[in-house]
Image: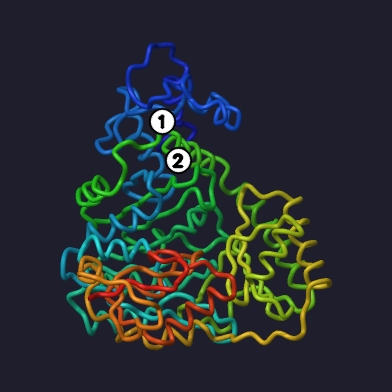
């Protein structure tokens, strides 16, 4: 057992920030002495004294032998891994590295169609061939859940040469599929199970939360420590256990896609966040769950609002657990779209959600929230239901179902082939039945609706236009106004 009280990287950074010396190395502001006054006024000088480079005492992220190595070993123990890597380019680079380390050009990988855009980037970088599975779908709520064990088993029977399986656990809505069953099936083929656990870094620290991915049998998992715990934005971790993953390939892949000038502010925040959770995680998560349960109870009692809960029976393995700190409120009963409700709550009540969809608002309740936040949230919904309800709006409730059905046969080229192919830009109305050459996704949550190599269909174009008309933001494409699309020439 390691001493989880220690923060080796944070301590080394603190000591070097306080050391009086003449700096002749990067960064150019020289510990804040040359920083813009406007930045100093906003952040203070202390943060810039700690904005240091890879000095001898601070170790090297790509070849750690000192304090970074010690901090990563402490993190591995705290999160239940055999080896952990610190990430300064977010979970995005972790997902990309996971695919690069397990798949080469032409290798098959099974993954859900509602995967994050970082996985599509991993396909483009690696040249891997995606075998997409449609997630289990709730037609009433218009929410896609997880892929099911049966779907994974069927895909592996059809594609026994698959090199890896990747899944999302939990989804953006906090929904967890039957990961243990998926792991068992995947391991029967002796291939690794990769997990995008960006929103589940807190699972390891309280028994009332869903089972952590590693405990459920995952071989590799990527967690955004900044999303739900106490690290700085972009600070994430990649964890591995067992012998199905080549750790040297992970290290080499991360060298390709991480910055060679990593921020020690981000790295130290990972060290501190790990210590905080290792020492006080259960207490912090107990308090967070109390706040979340209070919000769930009170909001569910507001007329015409409902809260996402575990269905009974569960959706065939696509929804077997729910992160209760993730709160999805269905607002369509008020005659409002989620986008409208989001705007009203933000502008009128200073309540800002994580993201909005057509029928819902999704909120993250974490260790940083307070009872005052919950009171403000509940009061905002009470007033929304009383004063902003409309009775003359009919929502089309099956947008996801409308576009998901043609996806399976739509991949014509591999994402890599299409991304690097000669392309042209056409007006949107002229792109139906053409092959897409870019990633197009409403954001958040950053789930691609079109990706390089897919055939563009009219239902998909209609879906994108409807989401945009309702207030969603289209990202990834060169033309975010969505008047044009890039297609293979």
Quick check: can you spot residue 190?
no
Q: Mark 2 touching mark 1, by CB under 8 A?
A: yes
Quick check: can you spot residue 69?
yes
Give the quarter of the image for residue 332. bottom right
- Taking the spot 53% from the left edge, 79% from the top edge, the residue there is 466
Q: Nearer the viewer, residue 431 or 104?
A: 431
- Taking the spot 51% from the left edge, 27% from the top edge, the residue there is 36
Residue under label 2, please give it: 270
- Taking the spot 59% from the left edge, 83% from the top edge, the residue there is 312
Query: Outermost residue, right direction?
Result: 386
Residue 9 vertical placement versus 442 (above, below)? above
- Quick one: quadrant of the C terminus? bottom left
Secondary structure type for disc 2:
helix
Q: Position of residue 472 (x, y in %)?
A: 55, 69
Separation of residues labelled 2 and 1 (CA atoms): 9 Å
Residue under label 1, please give it: 9
């Amino acid at each position: 057992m390691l001493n989880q009280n220690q923060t080796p990287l944070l301590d080394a950074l603190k000591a070097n920030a306080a050391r009086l010396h003449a700096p002749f190395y990067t960064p150019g502001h020289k510990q804040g002495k040359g920083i813009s006054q406007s930045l100093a006024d906003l952040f203070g000088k202390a943060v810039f004294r700690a904005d240091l480079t890879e000095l001898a005492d601070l170790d090297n992220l790509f070849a750690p032998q000192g304090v970074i190595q010690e901090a990563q070993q402490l993190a591995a123990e705290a999160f239940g891994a055999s080896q952990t890597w610190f990430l300064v380019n977010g979970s995005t680079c972790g997902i990309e590295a996971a695919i690069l380390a397990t798949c080469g050009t032409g290798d098959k990988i099974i993954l859900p169609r509602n995967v994050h855009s970082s996985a599509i980037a991993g396909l483009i970088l690696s040249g891997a061939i995606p075998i997409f599975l449609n997630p289990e779908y709730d037609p009433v709520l218009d929410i896609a859940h997880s892929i099911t064990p049966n779907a994974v088993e069927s895909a592996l029977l059809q594609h026994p040469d698959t090199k890896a399986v990747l899944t999302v656990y939990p989804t953006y809505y906090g929904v967890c599929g039957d990961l243990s069953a998926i792991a068992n099936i995947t391991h029967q083929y002796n291939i690794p199970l990769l997990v995008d656990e960006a929103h589940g870094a807190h699972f390891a620290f309280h028994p009332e939360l869903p089972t952590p991915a590693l405990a459920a049998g995952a071989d590799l998992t990527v967690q955004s420590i900044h999303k739900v715990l106490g690290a700085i934005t972009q600070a994430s971790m990649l964890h591995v256990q067992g012998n199905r993953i080549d750790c040297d390939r992970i290290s080499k892949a991360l060298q390709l896609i991480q910055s060679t000038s990593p921020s020690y502010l981000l790295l130290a925040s990972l060290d501190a966040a790990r210590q905080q959770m290792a020492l006080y995680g259960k207490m912090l998560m107990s308090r967070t769950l109390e706040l979340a349960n209070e919000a769930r109870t009170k909001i569910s009692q507001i007329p015409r609002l409902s809260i996402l809960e575990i269905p009974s029976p569960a959706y065939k393995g696509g929804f077997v657990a729910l992160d209760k700190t993730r709160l999805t409120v269905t607002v369509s009963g008020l005659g409002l779209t989620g986008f409208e409700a989001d705007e009203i709550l933000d502008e009128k009540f200073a309540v800002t959600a994580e993201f909005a969809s057509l029928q819902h608002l999704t909120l993250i309740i974490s260790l940083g929230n307070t009872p005052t936040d919950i009171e403000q949230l509940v009061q905002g919904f009470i007033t929304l239901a009383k004063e902003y309800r409309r009775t003359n709006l009919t929502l089309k409730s099956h947008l996801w179902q409308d576009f998901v059905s043609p996806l399976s046969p739509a991949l014509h080229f591999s994402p890599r082939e299409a991304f690097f192919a000669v392309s042209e830009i056409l007006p949107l109305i002229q792109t139906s039945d053409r092959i897409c050459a870019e990633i197009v996704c409403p954001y958040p949550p950053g789930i691609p609706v079109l990706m390089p190599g897919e055939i563009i269909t009219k239902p998909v174009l209609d879906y994108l236009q409807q989401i945009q008309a309702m207030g969603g933001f289209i990202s990834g494409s060169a033309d975010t106004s969505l008047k044009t699309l890039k297609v293979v020439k």
